[in-house]
Image (tube, rainbow, N blue to C red):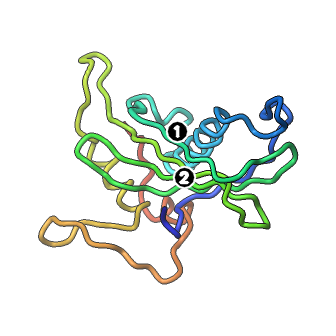
């Protein structure tokens, strides 16, 4: 998992999130990832429904420690691999204040054309936005090179640095 995250959101574990064993139910972690992902993209793009053309092809979660009712959690998100028609988002959930790792996760998002019923290449604007958030950009030869800003700016600052765009 990366040590730098492009976006962070906080939440309190609700009673409804817990199962009969008294800890957060395993399926709820995917909702935590989703809430972080949607809030992140909404802030980036300014659109209320950014995933109209993106589907989740894969979702995984590794559980590291239990979380309980009332715990304050921080969900962190970063951009992983960016392919022709897909991109990967990486997540980390930690207990706020203690930095205790609770879970890690990953989703593979695919640009999808519903009418054709198949994946399609990521639009250029979405690809550029993902690279900006990830901290990579295209070099003169067309290849990717890391951007190493001094004191990595927040996602909101990055979004302000470029135009808001709707993801596919």
Q: Horizontally, is 99 left or right of 143 in the view?
A: right
Q: Residue 27 appears at what percent x and percent y?
A: 64, 32
| Residue lying at 53% horizontally and 72% vertically, measured from the top left | 153
Query: Measuring 56% from the left and 66% from the top, which residue is drawn there?
Result: 154
Q: Nearer the viewer, residue 83 or 104?
A: 104
Vertically, is 166 above or below 8?
above
Whole-percent x and y of residue 164? 45, 50
Residue, far left: 141
Which mark sits nearer the N-terminus, 1 or 2?
Answer: 1
> Whole-percent x and y of residue 148?
40, 79
Give the farthest residue toward the bottom. Answer: 150
Q: Reply above or below: 157 against 33.
A: below
Q: Give the CA distance from mark 1 to mark 2.
A: 22 Å
For residue 47, the mark is 1
> For residue 78, which numbered disc appears in the image?
none
Q: Nearer the viewer, mark 1 or mark 2?
A: 2
Which residue occupies the extreme front position in the image? 21
The quadrant in which residue 122 appears is top left
Q: Residue at x 36, y 74 (%)?
A: 147
The answer to whether 46 is drawn above or below residue 149 in the figure is above
Give the image location of residue 94, x and y in percent.
69, 58
Name the secondary structure under disc 1. loop
Residue 36 vs 119, above or below: the answer is below
Q: Residues within 10 Å of mark 2 (few under 14, many from 20)?
A: many
Q: Which residue is mark 2?
A: 91
Task: Say which residue appears at 75% left-offset and 39% top-offset.
Answer: 24
Numbered disc 2: secondary structure: strand
Q: Nearer the viewer, residue 116 or 44?
A: 116
Quadrant (top left/top right/bottom left/bottom right) for the C terminus: top left
Q: How many marks?
A: 2
Q: State which quadrant residue 118 falls in.
A: top left
């Amino acid at each position: 998992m990366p040590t730098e995250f492009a976006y962070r959101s906080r939440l309190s574990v609700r009673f409804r999130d817990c199962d009969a064993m008294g800890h957060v139910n395993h399926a709820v972690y995917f909702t935590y990832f989703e809430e972080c992902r949607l809030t992140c993209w909404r802030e980036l793009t300014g659109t209320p429904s950014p995933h109209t053309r993106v589907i989740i092809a894969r979702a995984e979660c590794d559980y590291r420690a239990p979380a309980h009712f009332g715990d304050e959690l921080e969900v962190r998100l970063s951009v992983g691999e960016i392919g022709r028609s897909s991109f990967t988002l990486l997540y980390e959930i930690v207990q706020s204040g203690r930095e205790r790792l609770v879970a890690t996760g990953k989703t593979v998002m695919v640009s999808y054309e519903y009418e054709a019923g198949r994946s399609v290449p990521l639009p250029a604007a979405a690809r550029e936005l993902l690279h900006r958030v990830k901290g990579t950009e295209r070099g003169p030869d067309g290849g990717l090179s890391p951007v190493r800003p001094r004191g990595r700016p927040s996602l909101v600052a990055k979004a302000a640095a470029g135009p808001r765009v709707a993801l596919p």
